[in-house]
Image (cartoon, rainbow, N blue to C red):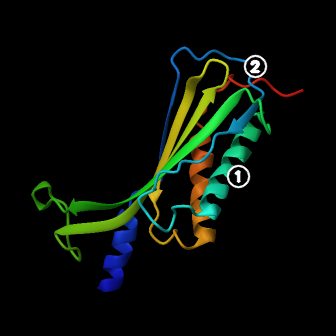
Amino acid sequence: MWLALAATAVACAPALTVGADAASDLQPAAYRSFTWEMPDQFPTGDPRLDNNPFFVQEVQRQVDAQLGKLGLMKAQSGGDLTVHFHATVRDRVNVYEVDRAAGYDQTGYAQTQVINYEEGTVLIDIADVKGKKLIWRGWMQTDLSGAVGNNEVLARRVRDGLTKLFNKFPAGCISPVG
C-alpha cells in the first residue's frame, strides 16, 4: 500500500515546464558573442543551493553549450549579448482529488492526495549590450526533490531543462560565425 502511494506521489509530481518571451520588436541581428554578468547575490530560498559553486557552474556550462549550438561564442569581454540568471527554490504542495461525482474510479487510492515537493525555478535573461535592452527571457521549473545534494541528478535536471528551454529561443536572431 505504501509503495503504491509513493509511486503515485512521484507520478503526480509536476513535470519539467519551460516558457520564454522575446522582445516584440526583436529583429534578426548579427549577434555573435555573449558574456556573463555576475551571478545573483540573492538567496535561492534553499541554503543547499546558496553559494553552491557546482550549481552556478552547471547552469553556466549548460547555457554556454546551448548558446554555442545557436552559433554564439563566449567572449571574455565585449560580447554582443550579456547573460544573467536567477534561481529560486520553494516548498510546494499540490492537492489532487479523485472526483467520484464525475465518475472517476478511486479504487486503491485515497480520495485526496497531497504531494509535497521542492519547486526549483531558473530564469535566464539575455540582453543586447549596446541597446541595454532585454531581448529574451526564459524560465524553467521542475521538482528538485532528491536532486539538491546529488550533483549527478542536479546536473541532469539542469541540462534537460535548459535544453528544452533553449528550443524556445527565436530562430534567425543569431548570425552564423564565420
Q: Which mark is residue 30?
A: 2
Side of 77 relative to 121 (left or right): right
Q: Residues within 10 Å of mark 1 (few under 14, many from 20)?
A: few
Could you say where residue 8 lies in the image, as x and y percent from the top left? 34, 71
Q: Which mark is residue 135?
A: none
Q: Secondary structure at mark 1?
A: helix
Q: Identify which residue is drawn at 36% across, 83% down.
A: 3
Q: Nearer the viewer, residue 113 or 177?
A: 177
Q: Is residue 24 above or below residue 40?
A: above
Q: Quadrant of the C terminus?
A: top right
Side of 144 relative to 136 (left or right): left
Q: Identify which residue is drawn at 38% across, 75% down.
A: 7
Q: Identify which residue is drawn at 39% across, 57% down.
A: 14
Side of 96 relative to 28 (left or right): left
Residue bearing mark 1? 61
Could you say where residue 148 lies in the image, as x and y percent from the top left? 51, 69
Q: Is residue 28 visible?
A: yes
Between the C-alphas of marks 2 and 1, the distance is: 23 Å
Amino acid at dot 1: Arg
Q: Is residue 147 above or below residue 102?
A: below
Q: Say which quarter of the image contains residue 176.
A: top right
Q: Identify which residue is drawn at 85% across, 28% down.
A: 177
| Mark earlier in primary sequence (2, 1) | 2
Q: Say which quarter of the image contains residue 66.
A: top right
Q: Residue furthest left?
A: 101
Q: Is residue 15 visible?
A: no
Could you say where residue 44 lies in the image, as x and y percent from the top left? 46, 56
